[in-house]
Image (cartoon, rainbow, N blue to C red):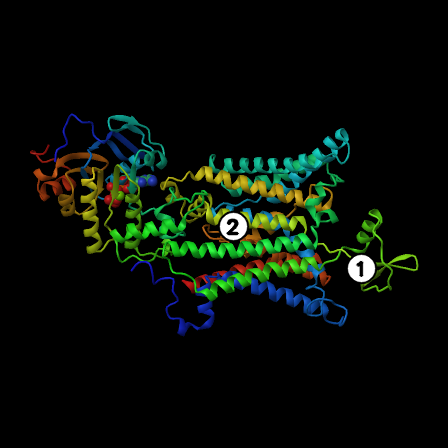
Amino acid sequence: MATEGETKPEPARREGLFRTFLNATELDIRILGMVGALLVIWCGFDIYSGIGREGEGTGLLGGFFLTPRNLWTLLVQTTPIAVMTTGMVLVIVMRQIDLSVGSMLSMLAVTGAVVQVFILGPSLGVGHPVIWVAGVVTCLVAGTLVGIFNGVLTAYLQIPAFIVTLGGLIAYSGIAFLLASGVTIAPMDKTFDVFGGGIPESWIGPFWSWMLGAAACALIIYALYNGRQKRRKFKFPLRPMWAEVTLGAIGAVAVLGTTWVVNSYPWPFNLIKQYAEANNVTIPDGVENTDGNAICMSAGDVVRCTDGLIYYTGYAVPVLIALVVGAAMTFLSSRTKFGRYIFAIGGNPEAAELAGINTKWVTVKVFALMGFLVGLSSIIASARLDAATNALGQSNELYVIAAAVIGGTSLAGGVGTVYGAILGALTMQSIQSGMQLLNLPAAFQNIVVGTVLVIAVFVDQLYRRRVK
Amino acid sequence: MDAPAKDAPLVELRNISVSFGGIKAVDDVTVDLYPGEVVGLLGHNGAGKSTLIKVLSGAYRRDAGQIFINGKEVHINNPRDAKNLGIETIYQALALADNVDAAANLYLGRELKTSWGLLDDAAMEAEARRVMGRLNPNFKRFKEPAKSLSGGQRQSVAIARAILFNAKILIMDEPTAALGPQETQMVAELIHELKRQGLGIFLIDHDIHSVMKLCDRASVMKNGQLVGTVNVGEVSDDDILGMIILGKKPAKAA
Ligand SMILES: Nc1ncnc2c1ncn2[C@@H]1O[C@H](COP(=O)(O)OP(=O)(O)OP(=O)(O)O)[C@@H](O)[C@H]1O
Ligand SMILES: [Mg+2]
């Protein structure tokens, strides 16, 4: 019978429990490995940062890394690279490369800032709602257009993408410099800043965070159920029930755990105070405690305390954007024709063309998507900084490509996953944040990140060779 | 066996020339094909057979010549044009995307979609199992990337791919080169069946015996030029061999 046999773990007894688990759940061992490496890095930094400062750290292992505050910041800092790397994966899978994303980010951010600060701000008046909308639309549309330009040069004029985007890397930063006249453009529109995650308006708070977490869990369960129904309909082998439950549980724990962490990060002291004063919230009396994160009134002064007025941030808008982008790009790459074509082109461009795929048009669309995502990242980055400079995206192309590659994307094309690349971005940012936490100089961080990149690819290839 | 002369041929390639740099790979070749007919293309290695049919399948641009389908001139500039005209091709190099699985390869370019416009992988896999079951019942590896398949398995996928879509014109460039005897026999049966359904088939094959068995007519090429076209029933193996090796057309041929 053709319908059964090949996906069942045949020699389960000999292969051990872990194999059985992997086969039954169909989890990707390389992703598990990456998650494992990430956890090791996190724990390592937490332990190491706690050494010599016993009792001070509030991290899970006594240090300063695994604290809600640090993890929350880590997530927000990862977002611009994470958003861009989801596009870079597809570019690389298609055997292309985009070296221009860093300069493009600077150029787009400066363009958006010029529109807000120099053009619309003075004429409409500060705070006018058209301003932030125009800023967002400018960045997204301009990004898409620049992407189309890169794509057309690559696909239709047949200039290698490496050259096209190397030219872009140089030229776009020049344009950014000219537009900004070499100065920092600030401040951005206040509503626009919501995309950056740096102000209270960009934190959705615990209630909505839990709601979103619950919705995500429901979605996971629905997806598992739906997948099972589909397999049943076509009489494909089903995963054992325990595997389905395990998958659901892993998903739910990850979602709810992350939600719990972001819901445990209190607003900074000053912001609680400002908010309370601005909105006439009564501040309860209490005893000063400099370790606390809440605010109290003590002898007429606002002081830190443990049981007082406190607000928690919950998810920040840019993190939500990155999560949505990650989900959408995963969906796009695995469930749509467009995604299927990208992988087919990467696997064998000639075969794809002969199969009737319009490979040139797909190439343009992928570069356009990349440009759109750079536009989105430029919004996040400039909103977070509340300013735009011509150096905002400097070297970002290197980090974006490195994240994709650490996440298992093969530069030979045809292989890569969006979630892998996001994990790659998170890993890289974790290493950088951790070393900042340890007060190691930036030069040292670069050395380590570069080394990790090379080792990650080496380990990945070792693994692939063994599987073959 | 002879198609009635009054009907326009299903396909006519008229005075086709293709050159690569200085080499004339195909030099002023004219061949035609009628519905329900199998025309064999024969010739030494490098004679220009693949190049000629790639003009019809849209993989190569011709330098000169015209293509007629059902008597009307058509312009085929890329594989999509050819597919829209109902031309399916099994390429000698077995054009498969190595990193996607057999089912995805079968449907590449014409994916089945759900009512939401998304890929319907389950339906494609189920259909792939059905089609492959007819062609190569031993084939079980639907979920593995094409690069992990054997040469013959790849060939089966390429053939299944071409017959899956209701083609009117089928081009088979050495379809059984990598197949075992049982699978070769199944392809022969398949050709008979498709012929009964009224498809026109161009079959490139180096095995004269199978050409004699499967084809109605045979066109022989040498050094890019057409030696001649013969009715297979009217010539012997040796006549055809002579055409291939010496480039000489037998006196009695049509
Ligand atoms: N893409 C190409 N670029 C340059 N030359 C080519 C190309 N394709 C084919 N040729 C040349 O054209 C000529 C005809 O090649 P073709 O592939 O059509 O031969 P063939 O009859 O199919 O041979 P075989 O029986 O070996 O498959 C050969 O001399 C070959 O080297
Ligand atoms: Mg050939």
Earlier-in-chain disc, 1 versus 2: 1
> In the rendered image of this protein, does residue A329 appear above or below residue A14?
above
User: Tag on residue A237?
Assistant: none
The one nearer the camera, A277 or B184, is: A277
Which quarter of the frame holds ligand 1? top left
Find the residue positioned furthest to the right: A299
The one nearer the camera, A213 or A323, is: A213
Q: Which residue is mark 2?
A: A330
Kindly identify the residue that appears in the image at 30 percent across and 33 percent down. B18
Secondary structure of residue under mark 1? strand
| Quarter of the picture holding the N terminus of chain A | bottom left
> In the rendered image of this protein, does residue A200 appear above or below residue A444?
above
Q: Is residue B253 left or right of residue A58?
A: left
Q: Is residue A422 left or right of residue A63?
A: left
Kindly identify the amino acid type of the residue bearing the numbered disc 1. Answer: Ala
The one nearer the camera, B19 or A201, is: A201
Q: Which residue is mark 1?
A: A294
Residue A49 drawn at (x, y percent): 71, 67
